[in-house]
Image (cartoon, rainbow, N blue to C red):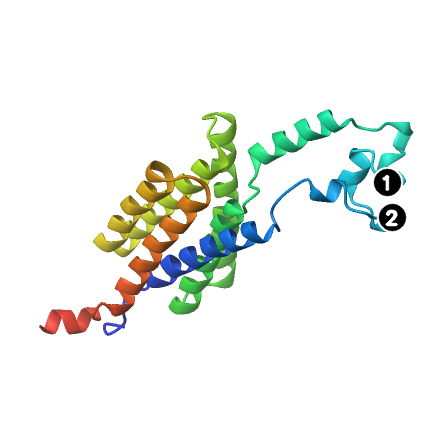
Amino acid sequence: MGNERPRYWFPLALLGFAQLAVVALSFGGMWSGGWFAYAPATGEQQFLTQNLYGVGSGGVFGSFRGVEMSRETAAALDMSFSGLGRNDGWLFAVLAVYLGTVLFHALRSKAMRWWKVVAIALGGLVAIVLADLVGYWELDLDGDTRSAILLTLGLVALAWLERSVLVLVVAAAYVLCAVVLAQGQLALVLSSLVVLAGAFAALLSRPKAAAEET
């Protein structure tokens, strides 16, 4: 145990690669909304949003009580939901990084009972979602800012648990790149580079036992 490198390299690397995956998916158009409202689809394969827009043959939702939603109303509905969630998938990256970190530490410790792992994982996921809702409803923060704040708080908590000055410096640089200096995809890329640099620094650092001997 004394010759092991810091364990916080994994959550830092996971966060960096998860955010880069979000950027790649957003450029690929997988998180963009609205295109399926006009995509040609018939029968049971019609999208729900197509029926809401009144596109196609109607289907179950489109013909229910003969009510069709106007394009303006549907667009307003899409905007309301986009404010709550993320079109770029950043919130899903937050949840995935937290869950992966919990599983990584549970596998490394080998002493934690499975029900404790499940309780910590589910409790943390619920807390993240509730904190995100508070930021949306009470603080009126946009989605990217909420995700960046949640991840920054997670990095600060990781720095406290690991007693690591390096992670604390990474957290400060992360919030600077993700909130202050840039927005959107650029913020994701810059903050990803910051945490990946921290992960590589942790991997290249000497084990604690070797450092104490010198």
Which residue is labeled 1 in the image? 56
Q: Residue at x 79, y 28 (%)?
A: 69
Numbered circles on residues, count: 2
**Up-down: is 51 above or below 102?**
above
Q: Quadrant of residue 193?
A: bottom left
Q: Position of residue 58 (x, y in %)?
A: 88, 38
Q: Which residue extends farthest left?
A: 214
Q: Using the rendered view, name the quadrant where residue 196 is placed.
A: bottom left
Residue 7, horizontal then vertical, whole percent: 32, 64
Q: Which residue is mark 2?
A: 42
* Residue 123 picture location, percent across and down: 50, 47
Q: Identify the mark nearer the N-term, 1 or 2.
A: 2
Placement of the C terminus among the 4 image quadrants: bottom left
Residue at 18 percent across and 72 percent down: it is 209
At mark 1, the secondary structure is: loop
Q: Residue at x 24, y 49 (%)?
A: 169
Q: Amino acid at mark 2?
A: Thr
The kind of residue tagged 1 is Gly
Q: What quarter of the picture does the N terminus occupy?
A: bottom left
**Whether residue 163 is visible:** no
The answer to whether marks 1 and 2 mark residues whose Cβ atoms lie closer than 8 Å is yes
State the CA–CA distance, disc 1 to disc 2. Answer: 7 Å
Q: Within 10 angstroms of label 2, few (less than 14), some, or many (20 or more) residues? A: few
Q: Nearer the viewer, residue 68 or 13?
A: 68
Residue 43: percent from left, percent from top: 89, 48
Callout 1 crowding tier (Cα within 10 Å): few <14, some 14–19, many ≥20: some
Which residue is found at the position 60% from the left and 47% from the top? Answer: 31
Residue 10 in view: yes
The correct choice, above or below, for 211 with respect to 100 in the image is below
Find residue 5 and report its image quarter. bottom left
SS at badge 2: loop
The answer to whether 202 appears left or right of 90 in the picture is left
